[in-house]
Image (cartoon, rainbow, N blue to C red):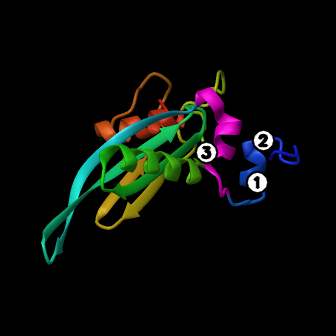
Amino acid sequence: VKDGKIASLEEIFLFSIPVKEAEIIDYFLKEKLNDEVMKIMPVQKQSSAGQRTRFKAFVALGDGNGHIGLGVKCAAEVATAIRGAITSAKLNVSPVRRGYWGRKNGPPHTVPCKVTGKCGSVRVRLIPAPRGTGLVASPSSKKLMAMAGIA
């Protein structure tokens, strides 16, 4: 990236080049990137002297233009966990395919087709909708989709 061999983030995704440094994402997305702490939860481990409490931070970041990342980090202090989760989210940035519903004027505004995802016992179904409909989803899902540029 520093030598100028890679011109854009899309080139990285096109050739499946692994991103090993968070600064690469900073270089391409700069001020467009905004992050949000989704959740901070204390986790405990039983030790011989009692419980050891650490904090787990979940951070989502996106540029509102088809890129989103989700990071998780556990640390002894909240601030350290958030910083680590932001770095982890930058390393996990991936492209989001967007499309149109109906007429193709303006920037893409919805998902291109019906999509179903499953993790554990949770199923998520995304269905294309006309411009101006908004997102009919839970608050956390709305935040993630807005960061991806689907509104």
Do labels 1 and 3 touch, CB within 8 Å? no
In the picture of the structure, the residue carrying the numbered disc 1 is: 14
> Residue 56 in the image: x percent, y percent?
31, 54
Q: Which one is in front in this view, the residue at disc 1 or the one at disc 2?
A: 2
Mark 1: few/some/many CA within 10 Å (<14, 14-19, 20+): few
123 up-or-down from 39: above or below = below
Marks 1/2: CA–CA distance: 10 Å
Q: Nearer the viewer, residue 66 or 84?
A: 84
Mark 3: few/some/many CA within 10 Å (<14, 14-19, 20+): some
Q: Residue at image x 59%, y 41%?
A: 67
Q: Main secondary structure of the magenta part?
A: helix
Tag of residue 97: 3
Question: Over which residues does the magenta segment extend?
Answer: 19-32
Q: Residue furthest bottom?
A: 48
In the picture of the structure, the residue carrying the numbered disc 2 is: 8
Q: Nearer the viewer, residue 129 or 36?
A: 36
Choose the circle earlier in sequence order: 3 or 2.
2
